[in-house]
Amino acid sequence: MKGKIFCLTVVVAALLVSTGGAWASVLINVQVNYYTPYDPGNPPLGEDPGTPPTPESWTPSYAGGAVIGGAGDIWNQLTDTESANPLTYVDAAGNSTGVTLTPGYHPVVPCSNFATGDFQGLMSSYMYNPATMTFNGLTPNTLYDLYIYSQGAANGRTMMVSVNGVSGTTTRTDTTVTTLIANQNYLKITANSGVGGILAISAIPGPGSNVLLPDGNEADINAIQFTESTSAVPEPSTYLLLCLSLGAVGFTRKRMSRKKE
């Protein structure tokens, strides 16, 4: 009888571990990266060169954590040159995930803010007024925590982001800040991936954007992180198995106590 109780206890423990495993998350990071195309310059014919050529280049890739993550984390690069973007995104450890991105149109420009501090590289470029971009290949019907970083080149801009119908809005941005501040230069949004296993992200200028500034009425995104939500719950089937196992343990113990009487 003690052997049966031990086996049932092992089953319960295994279910608890598997439930915890169901909550284990994969972190995917995306950095917006500015692409500088090759410019041959303007050397006058037969004279000394005028404007020197500009070599092809990208904004330096960032490595490390942001609000979440840690040192050495890998970031996928998102440019306005579609051919430069990865076909399949990797996680923060560099493992292939099967997640892909349909980026839509997203003009990218360099950003001179965050000139100092730990996040200088991360916030060095941003896309403005991007079309809806969709991450595909996620676990269906799963809650994801998204961290969306926003720091444009002018004060007075706000941004409203919607992810699968869940919205958030940044406050007015102070471009002198070089640290990450919730609801000022990043938003956290928790959204469900739905039956299709997708996260569709759209951004528009938020209320109070200063339209008097040059390009003041913008929605700017510098980077995105997402991972399975820490508030996720086990599947109903997992709860059912757990309850049945716990009930079996209780029933067995009750029978043992009756035999001892």
Image (cartoon, rainbow, N blue to C red):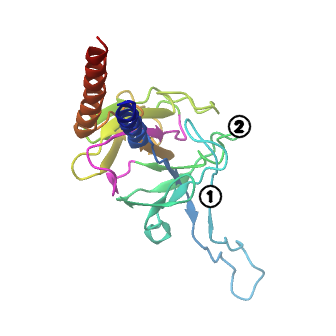
Q: Is residue 218 magenta?
A: no
Q: Pick the residue in front: 150 or 201.
A: 201
Residue 222 % position (x, y): 51, 46
**Which sits earlier in the primary sequence, circle 2 or circle 1?**
1
Left or right: residue 241 compared with residue 69: left
Q: What residue span does the magenta drawing correspond to?
A: 129-154
Farthest residue in the bottom direction?
46
Q: Residue at x 41, y 56 (%)?
A: 106
Left or right: residue 41 compared with residue 97: right
Q: Residue at x 32, y 45 (%)?
A: 202
Q: Residues within 10 Å of mark 1 (few under 14, many from 20)?
A: many
Q: Which mark is residue 255?
A: none
Res. 196 in view: yes
Residue 74 % position (x, y): 59, 54
Q: Pick the residue in front: 124 or 243.
A: 243
Q: Pick the residue in front: 180 or 75.
A: 75
Tell me which corner region of the image, top left, top right, bottom left or bottom right, holds residue 112: top right
Quadrant into which the C terminus falls: top left
Farthest residue in the top direction?
261
Residue type beneath disc 2: Gly
Tag 2's secondary structure?
A: loop
Q: Residue at x 63, y 56 (%)?
A: 61
Look at mark 2 in the image and give the residue it sits on: 117
Task: Say if 66 sits above or below 81 in the image.
Answer: above
Task: Say if 52 sits above or below 258 in the image.
Answer: below
Left or right: residue 133 compared with residue 24: left
Q: Pick the residue in front: 67 or 206.
A: 67
Res. 159 in view: no
Quadrant into which the N terminus falls: top left
How much space separates mark 2 and mark 1, taking CA atoms? 17 Å
Residue 48 % position (x, y): 78, 81
Q: Which mark is residue 59?
A: 1
